[in-house]
Image (cartoon, rainbow, N blue to C red):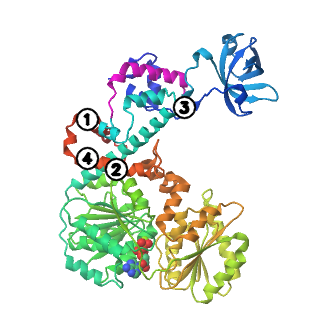
């Protein structure tokens, strides 16, 4: 149906080429929209600006001359008059023009006018009789000229246009006054006014975001209907565990805990994101939910992105569960065979336990007796593959993702469309905001003075040197250099060093020394970013702060001011290479939600979410931030349709459901 070869102009060779760029039939051809448009708006000579792109109408007065300057470079010159003004026209690499132009012919030319020299350097040139569209679509299709591509589209439209089905239901088009599919194709490929282009953009943005939400919400609702083995936990025992905590839960912690354990009790599978600002206390919320599952006689796996972090989690949870009848195991790469076998035996037995580790938790040889719950850190979004692997083992666990970078809830709802979201609002009362100040590198003396004051109080400090992406070695050197300078300067204090070339055991040892206050200043690359908790550390100094993302800096300063002591963050920037204005927001606010949004704005979704997740957000027509209102409208619209069973059989919605079926089959998204 609608095969490419069935239209004029497409033979076997072109067909293969089109397929290689993702166009498999005429409908896909019609939906290959221009990547941009060029305007050729004819301007009277009197109003034509000098030395910028402009389009003029002119009459040729002599025969063009061709000069071959060298290989691949030729020049055509001829004279014209434009509104009576004589001009010498030059156009490069279009020798064939010589045969088209002759005196008295009227042309439309686009290029740059030089009023002083009376010359015109043309980039585009057309006979007036062929000039119909002032707005030219630019397709940028490999190996096919725009004119040829446009012709193919014309062919496809005349042959198959009547078969186009609108995947956007009429009810939505009317609601937002959007053009229908036929008009869209017509306007997008042959626009005659800017107004038409605006209508194209409006429809494409909404359609893209709506389809995204429709897929996501479909997945979410479908997952929610999946049954899991019910976890019959005991509320008394959970409460008893909460009573053992040395503090009262904040209202935000209470609310999210309730949301999560309600999901755990329900017979349907959980797929939930837990987010909250650094220091909002996510760990304990996770701990309570783990306890709930363990008391329901099921096993829990906690997955961390790195072994260091896994070890830290392991220690934290051992402490949490000290008075509980449950074992905690750490599964990591350096275990001796015997130890590993012993742990695997435990996991295979029917005693409920918590297993902490990296993605190795789901290796082939790890057989869970009764895995009911998986918690993962955001960096390791629990991929489709892992879920599929477990499903093949006959396990569909509840899943909780913990996010280190909080984003505004409205945005999170849209982006993590296939998940439910719990957001911890607020922080423990005892937590004082970290005071943040920017310093130029030339003011390092002042920084040393502030450091000395803090050290005199008996407090500890972190000094973080940047991740220099170009060179791992440089980064290490940089840290070593700072380490040496500080050791020389602060002779009476002990300085420690951590960087990526230090092996895991040594890293852990340095951390332990810092923890026990045997080290006063810890110089480090960003390895400490994750989860260390040393209440006596009160100052975070960050060198070359201009090299870090805002969220990362915010995360880093969250390492200080964790106890009762006030925390300080000094951001040192290199005035030569940096753009310190971006950093000002860190002085102004301690709210991670605001900061992450700013970060997202300045860095763009791809970089912000890391390459792995950026696929989800790489919209062609829409922009996650700018069009977030549309995104959230689209979400509501998608849910309304999916929840209304009558749409399943209503013919007006069939193209939409067919689209869904097609993309699900392709499985191109998580
Ligand atoms: P994050 O959300 O950044 O992961 P953590 O879970 O590491 O935060 O908690 C940060 C610190 O706050 C920890 O030292 C923890 O013991 C403490 N904390 C957590 N909840 C409370 C609370 N309700 N009251 C007081 N301190 C708390
Ligand atoms: Mg944490």
Q: Give the crowd class for mark 4: few <14, some 14-19, many >=20 residues within 10 Å.
A: some
User: Closest to the observer: 521 or 607?
Assistant: 607
Q: Circle 1 sits on which residue?
A: 652
Q: Nearer the viewer, residue 616 or 631?
A: 631
The first of marks 3 and 1 along the sequence is 3
Along the polypeptide, which appears first: circle 2 or circle 1? 2
Disc number placed over residue 635 in the picture, else none: 2
Q: Pick whichever of labels 3 and 4 is earlier in the sequence.
A: 3
Q: Earlier in the sequence, mark 3 or mark 2?
A: 3
Residue 328: horizontal and vertical position, in percent? 32, 74
Residue 440: image tag: none
The residue indicated by pointer 4 is: 642
- Helix, strand or loop status at disc 1: helix
Residues shaded magenta? 141-166
**Secondary element at tag 4:** helix
Q: Position of residue 392 (x, y in %)?
A: 25, 52
Mark 4 or 1, closer to the camera? 1
Task: State the separation of the CA atoms marked 2 and 1.
Answer: 19 Å
CA gap, disc 4 and disc 2 = 11 Å
Q: CA distance from mark 3 to mark 1?
A: 35 Å
Q: Above or below — where is 22 with respect to 369?
A: above
Can residue 312 be seen here? The reply is no
Q: Position of residue 570 (x, y in %)?
A: 61, 74
Circle 3 or circle 2, nearest the eye: 2
**Position in image of residue 176 (x %, y %):** 37, 42
To which residue does mark 3 refer? 140
Mark positioned earlier in the residue sequence (4 or 1): 4
Task: Report whether the residue tagged 3 is closer than 8 Å to ligand 2.
Answer: no
């Amino acid at each position: 149906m609608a095969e490419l070869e069935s239209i004029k102009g497409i033979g076997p060779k072109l067909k293969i080429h089109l397929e290689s760029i993702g166009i498999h039939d005429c409908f896909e051809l019609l939906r290959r929209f221009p990547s941009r448009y060029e305007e050729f708006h004819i301007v009277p000579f009197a109003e034509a600006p000098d030395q910028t792109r402009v389009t003029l109408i002119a009459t040729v007065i002599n025969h063009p001359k061709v000069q071959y300057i060298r290989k691949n470079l030729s020049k055509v010159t001829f004279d014209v008059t434009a509104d009576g003004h004589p001009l010498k026209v030059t156009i490069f690499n279009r020798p064939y023009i010589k045969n088209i132009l002759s005196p008295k012919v009227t042309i439309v030319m686009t290029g740059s006018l030089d009023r002083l020299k009376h010359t015109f350097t043309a980039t585009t040139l057309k006979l007036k009789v062929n000039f119909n569209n002032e707005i030219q679509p630019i397709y940028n299709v490999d190996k096919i000229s725009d004119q040829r591509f446009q012709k193919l589209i014309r062919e496809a439209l005349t042959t198959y246009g009547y078969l186009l089905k609108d995947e956007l239901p009429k009810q939505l088009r009317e609601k937002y006054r959007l053009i229908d599919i036929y008009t869209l194709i017509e306007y997008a490929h042959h626009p005659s006014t800017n107004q038409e282009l605006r209508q194209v953009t409006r429809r494409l943005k909404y359609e893209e975001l709506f389809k995204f939400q429709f897929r996501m919400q479909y997945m979410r609702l479908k997952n929610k209907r999946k049954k899991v083995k019910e976890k019959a936990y005991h509320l008394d025992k959970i409460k008893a565990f909460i009573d053992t905590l040395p503090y009262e839960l904040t209202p935000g912690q209470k609310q999210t805990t309730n949301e999560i354990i309600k999901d755990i009790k329900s017979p349907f599978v959980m797929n939930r994101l837990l987010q909250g600002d650094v220091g909002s206390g996510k760990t304990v919320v996770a701990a309570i939910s783990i306890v709930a599952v363990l008391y329901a006689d099921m096993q829990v796996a906690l997955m961390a992105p790195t072994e260091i972090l896994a070890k830290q989690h392991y220690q934290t949870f051992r402490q949490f569960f000290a008075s509980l009848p449950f074992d905690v195991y750490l599964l990591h790469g350096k275990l001796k065979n015997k130890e590993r076998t012993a742990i695997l035996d435990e996991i295979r037995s029917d005693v409920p336990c918590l297993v902490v580790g990296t993605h190795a938790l789901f290796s082939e040889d790890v057989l869970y007796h009764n895995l009911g719950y998986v918690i993962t850190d955001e960096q390791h979004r629990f991929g489709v593959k892992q879920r599929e692997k477990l499903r093949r083992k006959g396990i569909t666990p509840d899943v909780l993702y913990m996010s280190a970078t909080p984003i505004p809830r409205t945005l999170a709802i849209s982006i993590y469309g296939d998940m439910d979201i719990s957001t911890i609002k607020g922080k423990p009362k005892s937590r004082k905001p970290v005071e943040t100040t920017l310093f130029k590198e030339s003011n390092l003396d002042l920084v040393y003075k502030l450091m000395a004051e803090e050290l005199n109080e008996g407090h500890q400090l972190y000094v973080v040197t940047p991740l220099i992406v170009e060179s791992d070695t440089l980064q290490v050197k940089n840290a070593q250099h700072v380490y040496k300078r500080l050791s020389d300067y602060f002779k009476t204090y002990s300085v420690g060093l951590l960087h990526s070339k230090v092996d895991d055991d040594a890293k852990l040892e340095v951390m332990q020394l810092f923890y026990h206050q045997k080290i006063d200043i810890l110089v480090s690359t960003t390895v400490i970013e994750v989860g260390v908790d040393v209440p006596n550390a009160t100052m975070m100094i960050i060198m070359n702060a201009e090299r870090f993302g805002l969220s990362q800096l915010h995360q880093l300063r969250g390492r200080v001011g964790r106890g009762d002591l006030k925390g300080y963050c000094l951001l040192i920037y290199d005035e030569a290479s940096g753009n310190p204005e971006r950093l000002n927001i860190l002085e102004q606010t301690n709210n991670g939600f605001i900061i992450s949004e700013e970060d997202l704005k300045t860095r763009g979704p791809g970089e912000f979410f890391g390459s792995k997740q950026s696929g989800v957000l790489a919209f062609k027509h829409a922009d996650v931030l700018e069009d977030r209102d549309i995104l959230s409208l689209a979400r509501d619209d998608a849910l309304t349709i999916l929840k209304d069973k009558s749409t399943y059989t209503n013919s007006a919605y069939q193209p939409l459901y067919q689209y869904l079926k097609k993309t699900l089959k392709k499985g191109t998204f998580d």
